[in-house]
Amino acid sequence: MRTLKSWLMAGCLVLVTAQFCSAAGFAIYEWSPRDFALGGATVGRADDPAALATNPAGITQLEGIQVMAGVMPIKPMVTIETPGKSTDSDDASVFFPPHFYATWKVNDRYSVGLGTFSRFGLGTKFDDNWIGKYNSYEAVLESMSINPNVAVKVTDKLSAAFGVEAMYLNINLKKKIPLGGIDGDSNLEADGFGYGFNMALHYQPCDYAKLGLTYRSPVTMKVTGDADFSNIPGGFPYFSDTSAKGKVTLPDSFSFGLAVYPMDKLSVEVGAMYTLWSKYDELTIDFGDPILPTATPDQLSTPKNWNDVWRFNVGVEYAALDWLDLRLGYVFDQSPVPDGTIDYLLPDSDRHIFSGGLGFHKDNWGVDMSYSYLMFEDRDIEARPADGVLEGKIKDADAHIAGLSFTYKF
């Protein structure tokens, strides 16, 4: 099983080393440059292989065999202000979420497809001696999904799709432990698999409009690994290296999109996504051996109590030339993290994303490029000394996101 996990991770290059994802919470939506240039407003369009991530029912529109592959580099930055001090996140980290899609139109009614992309991930990294080190100085969550789908044309205007999802998840959490003037070090690493499904509809009532709806189920991840402790003084009987396991439920979501075509060369889509982050109510870790002298020394549970939230988007595409498409997009993304549980694992806030991109196509080839600027709203943080969280502020957080993909039609 470990060999299979390594092969999947290496083959899909899912390397999460950046401070933030592009979506509120720790969801990831960098599924293709065209999709991101349009602000994710492609649930109604669903007219290229990346529809496997946004609305698989749309792949019935694609002829023959089509393949798309690419990468979406992210360069983030955030400043945490605390009383008398301002701390910047590690500015050397870059995040490279890749994607790969393949579709095949079996006949006039059935189409199949396989998508490989990342739906969840986070990375927050500060100096290991920063003022918030007792809450977290490094947190990484990596995921990779393999998602086969079958789509069928129910009528000439309506298509439906169903898919299954196998998701790999790896978690690595690091923080300092105050031990009477000495800082011990805690390093928790665990991984595992979870499974889910998705359903989608695509409807074209007339030549100038398309509608899409996609549902992705929650995925319950059971992870196992190890908790390692270092720099622990000899007088402390606890904090010995031990096994660890946990369970986390990643949320389900609904996506909607309406695309209109007011003229041959112009399309506009508006859409929304509703994510049920309330399923992420706590993070509980069970340890093989006691690590604290408490009533339940083999378990630590951290409440999250996240909120269900909306993500709104709009995207415009114009075919300027026979071989060139121009794209613009905007996203407003609500943060699910409440004031009472926000921490340094994910110093999150509401976000705005401004995007643009180009699409080049000739014969059977297509190349898509995009650039997006992600801007976080400033946010105050209330002190929670028991959790190692200080009074302060999230400030000047942003990210630069690029994209490049290649498509070939056989």
Image (cartoon, helix red, strand yellow):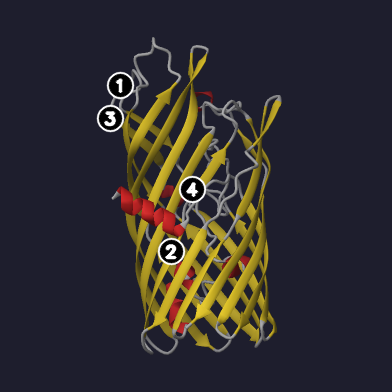
**Which residue: 55% across, 75% down?**
258
| Crowd tier of the residue under label 4, counting other residues whose Cα lies within 10 Å: few below 14, some 14–19, many 20 or above | some
Say which quarter of the image contains residue 406: bottom right
**Which residue: 47% across, 56% down?**
13
State how far apart marks 3 and 4 are (Cα): 32 Å
Check disc 4 and report the residue beneath it: 307
State how far apart marks 2 and 1 are (Cα): 44 Å
| Crowd tier of the residue under label 1, counting other residues whose Cα lies within 10 Å: few below 14, some 14–19, many 20 or above | few
Q: Amino acid at mark 1?
A: Ala
Residue 154 pos. (x, y %) = 36, 85
Q: Is residue 202 visible?
A: no
State how far apart marks 1 and 4 are (Cα): 30 Å
Among numbered discs 1 and 4, the one appearing first in the sequence: 1
Check disc 2 and report the residue beneath it: 116
Among numbered discs 1 and 3, the one appearing first in the sequence: 3
Among numbered discs 2 and 1, the one appearing first in the sequence: 2
Check disc 1 and report the residue beneath it: 295
Please tell me whether residue 390 is drawn above or below residue 201 in the rendered image: above
In the displayed structure image, the side of residue 156 where residue 294 appears, left or right: left
Q: Amino acid at mark 3?
A: Gly
Check disc 3 and report the residue beneath it: 288
> Which one is closest to the eye, mark 3 or mark 4?
3
Among numbered discs 2 and 3, the one appearing first in the sequence: 2
**Which residue: 39% across, 88% down?**
155
State how far apart marks 2 and 3 are (Cα): 34 Å
State how far apart marks 1 and 3 are (Cα): 15 Å
